[in-house]
Amino acid sequence: MISQTTEYALRAVVYLAQHPHESWTTRQIAAATQVPAGYLSKVLQGLSRSGLIASQRGRHGGFQLTQDPAKLTVLEVVNAVEPIRRINSCPLKLGAHTDGLCPLHKRLDEAIAMVEKTFGDTPVLDLLGSEDTLEPLCEFPYGPQFTERARNAQGPATDKPAS
Amino acid sequence: MISQTTEYALRAVVYLAQHPHESWTTRQIAAATQVPAGYLSKVLQGLSRSGLIASQRGRHGGFQLTQDPAKLTVLEVVNAVEPIRRINSCPLKLGAHTDGLCPLHKRLDEAIAMVEKTFGDTPVLDLLGSEDTLEPLCEFPYGPQFTERARNAQGPATDKPAS
């Protein structure tokens, strides 16, 4: 129900939100989020096109989140890569259903609407964890050491820095 | 969010529920539900394997619903063809998340759980329509004439009987 693309986009955005004011390369984000670099690259393109992240070229270039995690919603992230499609009209284009949905499609649309609302009501900030909850993508230390190690990461995307 | 396979399975089940005590061939169901016959065939296999429908061979053979639409839930139909997968453990297998989910995956799982509950609370009977609602798959008359016409349908799956 939650596609891989959607999950990967959320991991990337969460990672960038956890590390604001820094630029991260695809390889670095891939390592931290456990997403294959090629797949992640397409996901990041979608997020860039929607303006949720921005890329900077150059030696210290990479991706940064452009939005405030307190205002950016999960729905905006989802819709940037795989838009939620409501059922607005009869998928079978039945003449008798021109003005409304039958109970089958009405119920399906209600389920979609429910998820759309939940995601729309959830800021990315709520995904980041607090003192009382687990921290997403927490296997990597976030101090300067990691930053340095991640910047120098040259191995395959799934390689983890030595602990 | 609602996959094509799920939608097609629900259309087929709704059609069979609308026409109980009769057997319908893949071609006939395909024509009535506007689902490509090859695709539908695989969907019907999934429903058969789960015991929600049964097939009879022979001249007047075909598929019948084996369940009471008042008791059969949308969730059972969905799970027969494309099971809803909850997030029970950390998809990244992070050591620190062995005993729980981080807020990212907790929120995603909550959305999935919400849909699972809604589908589990909805009997197929509720999808069939009533006097006050539109009737699903209603473009085909349901009288003996249609039954005869549908039984004789020989054209491609997407062909509709002449009106």
Image (tube, coloured by chain):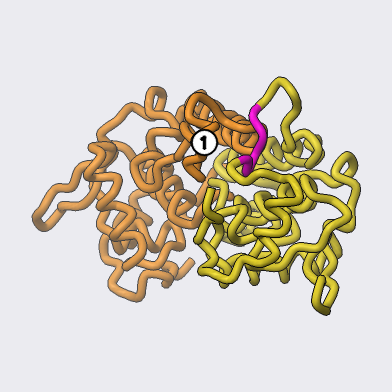
Chain colours: A orange, B yellow
Residue at the extreme front: B145
Q: Is residue B137 magenta?
A: yes
As drawn, is A21 to the left or to the right of B16? left
As drawn, is B125 to the left or to the right of A10? right
Q: Which residue shows up at 25% across the image and 34% down it? A: A66
- For mark 1, does the 10 Å Cα neighbourhood hold few (<14), some (14 to 19), or many (20 or more) residues? many
Residue B150 picture location, percent across and down: 66, 60
Residue A32 picture location, percent across and down: 42, 58
Q: Please tell me whether residue B106 is drawn above or below residue B5 in the rendered image.
A: above
Quadrant location of residue A43?
A: bottom left
Q: Is residue A52 magenta?
A: no
- The answer to whether one can see residue B62 in this image is yes
Q: Relative to the observer, which residue lies in front, A104 or A19? A: A104
Q: Secondary structure at mark 1?
A: helix
Q: Which residue shows up at 46% across the image and 62% down it? A: A34
- The answer to whether one can see residue B85 in this image is no
Residue that mark 1 sits on:
A127
Q: Relative to the observer, which residue lies in front, A129 or B162? A: B162
